[in-house]
Image (cartoon, grey):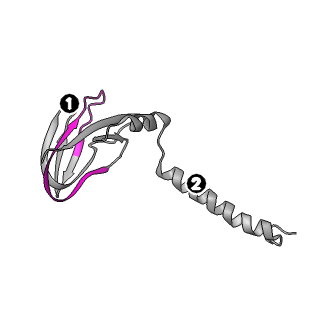
Amino acid sequence: MRLTQLNHPRLAWTLPGAIAALLFSAAAFAQVQMTPAERMMQRSAGPDEYLFFEDDRKTVVDYKEDHIVRICVSENRHLVPVAVHYDGKKGEVHPGDCMRVEAKKIALEPAERLEANWSIRAEVDTVS
């Protein structure tokens, strides 16, 4: 039997399944490349806390009408601010500071690319 022939029915059925499983697991791994430390930190975050790693960007608020939202960035040793994108505008929150924004949609990301194993923690609360 040549390698290009798949005459055995069980082999013909399992080879495409194995290839599909391999591709699916590789795609899933590519999407979530968190280190064990990042996974542990993510699990310890509260419901209104967001952790950012490297060039992470997250939509944290997506309402149908404007709300007042308070965004606070915890102090960190890296001194990297968080960029706040809201309704076509942009602002920054520095470590240890807070910002109030009235918007429908808010996305956050580190203002600079973080080094590997660095993280920033931000807390987001809807005030009204």
Q: The magenta stretch spans which residues?
A: 58-83
Q: Which residue does the image show at 44% across and 34% down from the upper left?
A: 40
Q: Is residue 71 left or right of residue 52?
A: left
Percent position of residue 121, x then y:
30, 36
| Nearer to me, 71 or 116 | 71
| Nearer to me, 89 or 58 | 58
Q: Is residue 92 magenta?
A: no
Q: Amino acid at mark 2?
A: Ser
Percent position of residue 95, x then y:
22, 32
Spatial separation of the CA atoms under disc 1 and disc 2 = 39 Å
**Placement of 125 over or under 62, stated as above or below:** above
Marking on residue 96 = 1
Q: Identify the residue at the far right of this view.
A: 1
- How many neighbours does mark 2 have within 10 angstroms: few (below 14), some (14-19), or many (20 or more)? few
**Placement of 60 over or under 50, stated as above or below:** below
Q: Quadrant of the N terminus?
A: bottom right
The residue beneath circle 2 is: 25
Q: Which residue does the image show at 20% across and 30% down from the upper left?
A: 96
